Amino acid sequence: MSRILTIVLVILTVALVAAGTVHPSDIAPATTPDGAVQALFGHAKNRDFKGAYNYVAASSNTDEPSFVKDLGGRDGSLRTYSNLQKVDTRILNQNDNEAMVRATTEWSTAVGAVYDTRDLKVVNDNGKWKVDWPVVKQAKVPPQVIPVNYLRWDIVTRGADDDWGAQNVEAPRVRIISMNAVEREGATIVMGEIENEDTVPAFVSVNATLVGKDGGVLGEESSFDKVSHTLLPKEISPFRIDFPKLKLASVKSVRMQPNSMLVAASADPVIGVLNEKVDKDLRGRPVLKGELINQSGQTVNIPHVIATYYDGSGKVVWVSDGYIDQSLPPQTPVPFSVSLQQDVAKNVQNYRVTVNQYSLDRTQ
């Protein structure tokens, strides 16, 4: 029996090795511009970045390692944990020598789908169409010492040997300072802002309960990740709570429940927001775009942007968010963009950007 098992294991090992070493025969020259883009992303979908690089034009002046980092992610960014689900291509213009192809990709991640749109130049290289893939070179930060003088809060909790009546530190005082309910695309959206009124940091969340005309509960939802969970003293965060397929006309009242607990926290890293403005994306839709700059000396792996939009009276009219699939190296600007509803954009008079961050090896 053991001999049979050994033979089976050997056969399986040989099969797996063969499967891992067989190169697909579909690395064939692309005969159309959109075919080249589809082929490039097709190999990337299978994590075959070497095969994808075969469709990169030499005129790009992009080496393979830089291409792999640009397309597949680097430094523990969200892209490194993403899988390409689909790509849609459309030829914008074309002649015999070159073409412009718009590629819209959908990447699956642990925080939901992430979409990216690029206009790619495709060139005809002796009958073979290849993608001009320029990689934006990251500025090299010179060696330096960055002084760390940020505030930090630690917690000492009740121990197992303490007296029975000993109490832990009470939960921080938080308050919802504004709330607005609207209907959008058949869903009720509850949005607003929450403030940590205390002198200690708080981990916060916001729950909402919709009450119907008859006094019954229509639904209960939480802000989930559409809030900055860790608030330092006197900090304010936007929040948004979605109730899909529930019309606002059926709602009599909204019950809000802010929750908080004491948490160890620090004011590091400081992430600055630069050059933010409402603009149009490649498809003509309104977006809020700008740049993030990590002012600390450690890499921020996954930045999360939450934007709050206000009308002329200071009322919160919309909250949108987006995860940036690039990491934030120290002292290096990285672009961001979050969506904005077309009908809301015309009423926006002011906005504020909040940045959450998730870092793999950061210590408090």
Image: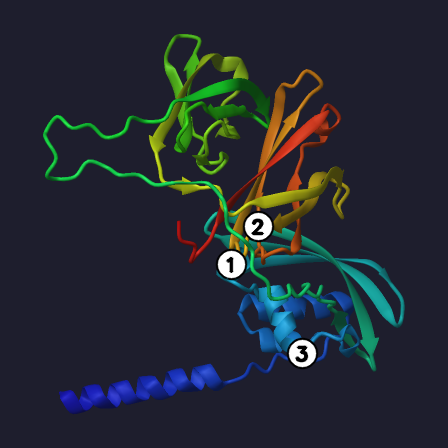
**Circle number at residue 82:** 1
Image quadrant occupied by the N terminus: bottom left
Q: Earlier in the sequence, mark 3 or mark 2?
A: 3
Residue 355, relative to residue 15: is it above or below? Answer: above
Q: Gap in Å between the C-alphas at discs 1 and 3?
A: 22 Å
Q: What element does badge 1 sit on?
A: loop
Residue identifier under label 3: 54
Residue 217 rendering spot, x and y as whole percentages: 37, 17
Q: Quadrant of the rendered structure where residue 3 is?
A: bottom left
The foreground one among 82 and 279 is 279
**Circle number at residue 114:** 2
Q: At x 54% / y 53%, what residue is drawn?
A: 147
Label 1 Cα crowd, 10 Å radius (few <14 / some 14-19 / many 20+): many
Q: Quadrant of the rendered structure where residue 128 is?
A: bottom right
Q: Earlier in the sequence, mark 2 or mark 1?
A: 1
Q: Are marks 3 and 2 in contact (CB under 8 Å)?
A: no
Label 2 Cα crowd, 10 Å radius (few <14 / some 14-19 / many 20+): some
Residue 26 rendering spot, x and y as whole percentages: 61, 79
